[in-house]
Image (cartoon, rainbow, N blue to C red):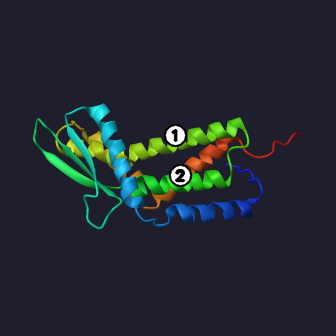
């Protein structure tokens, strides 16, 4: 895909993007606990609407000592009484992805035309959707473990591939928002239009 030159040139783009990314990714006091608590609240509300009271699904912040970014995802089937819990690192799953995308988007920027602003909105919505998918995939796998959801071999294999792709590798915290940003550029069709 051919990328148009950013307004002000590539060097100015980097000078805007890198400092902003450094500021957003800095270990600010209280950021980890606040963000993980907010994520846990949003996830609890979402699964409550989707799954109801069975199975019992809870996201608990500040459960793991020394890991303020981690949220405990616990699942219990009220029928089989089986339970299982796994940690969710909200920093790599959500915060870094949002910070990287916003750094790229603000540094470009996307607010010159209405079309570009729409592209920015669609890109951010896609990113949030991918973050949600990154949480849903292990949740579905845990639901299968506690027998709250019947998963066949194909479904289990698909979930494993999805988790491996989106969650296992820490580099995906940067790759996912980067790819979404490239798609946003495509949607916005930025850059000067040349005529023959």
**In this view of the protein, which residue sits in the foreground, 35 or 114?**
35
Which SS class for mark 2? helix
- Residue 128 appears in the picture as rendered: yes
Residue found at x 33% / y 62%: 68
Which SS class for mark 1? helix
User: Looking at the picture, how far across and down is residue 11, in whole percent?
Assistant: 73, 64
User: Looking at the picture, how far across and down is residue 40, in whole percent?
Assistant: 33, 48
To which residue does mark 1 refer? Answer: 125
Distance, label 1 to label 2, CA atoms, is: 11 Å
Please identify the quarter of the rendering in which residue 190 is found.
top right
In the image: residue 159, left or right of residue 97: left
**In this view of the protein, which residue sits in the foreground, 121 or 175?**
121
In the image: residue 25, left or right of residue 145: right
Q: Nearer the viewer, mark 1 or mark 2?
A: 1
Task: Say few, some or many: other residues with alpha carbon within 10 Å of mark 1 (under 14 / 14 to 19 / 20 or more).
Answer: few
Q: Residue furthest right?
A: 196
- Judge whether 124 appears above or below 92 on screen: above
Lower position in the chain sequence, tag 1 or tag 2: 1
Residue found at x 59% / y 56%: 103
In the image: residue 118, left or right of residue 193: left
Task: Say few, some or many: other residues with alpha carbon within 10 Å of mark 2 (under 14 / 14 to 19 / 20 or more).
Answer: many
To which residue does mark 2 refer? Answer: 177
**In this view of the protein, which residue sits in the foreground, 23 or 18?**
23
User: Looking at the picture, how far across and down is residue 29, in whole percent?
Assistant: 42, 65
- Judge whether 13 appears above or below 132 on screen: below
User: Looking at the picture, how far across and down is residue 38, in whole percent?
Assistant: 38, 49
Residue found at x 26% / y 61%: 64
- Judge whether 18 appears above or below 129 on screen: below
Residue found at x 60% / y 61%: 20
- Residue 169 appears in the picture as rendered: no
């Amino acid at each position: 895909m051919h990328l148009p030159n950013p307004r002000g040139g590539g060097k100015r783009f980097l000078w805007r993007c890198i400092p902003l990314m450094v500021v957003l990714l800095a270990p600010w006091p209280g950021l980890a606990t606040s963000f993980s608590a907010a994520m846990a609240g949003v996830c609890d509300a979402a699964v409550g609407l989707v799954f109801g009271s069975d199975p019992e699904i809870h996201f608990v912040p500040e459960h793991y000592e020394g890991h303020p970014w981690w949220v405990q995802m616990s699942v219990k089937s009220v029928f089989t009484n089986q339970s299982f819990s796994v940690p969710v690192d909200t920093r790599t799953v959500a915060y870094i992805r949002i910070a990287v995308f916003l750094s790229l988007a603000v540094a470009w920027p996307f607010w010159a035309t209405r079309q570009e602003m729409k592209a920015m909105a669609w890109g951010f919505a896609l990113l949030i959707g991918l973050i949600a998918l990154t949480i849903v995939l292990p949740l579905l796998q845990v639901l299968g473990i506690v027998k709250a959801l019947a998963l066949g071999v194909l479904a289990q294999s698909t979930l494993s591939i999805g988790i491996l792709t989106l969650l296992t590798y820490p580099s995906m915290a940067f790759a996912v928002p980067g790819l979404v940003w490239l798609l946003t550029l495509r949607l916005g069709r930025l850059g000067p239009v040349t005529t023959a």
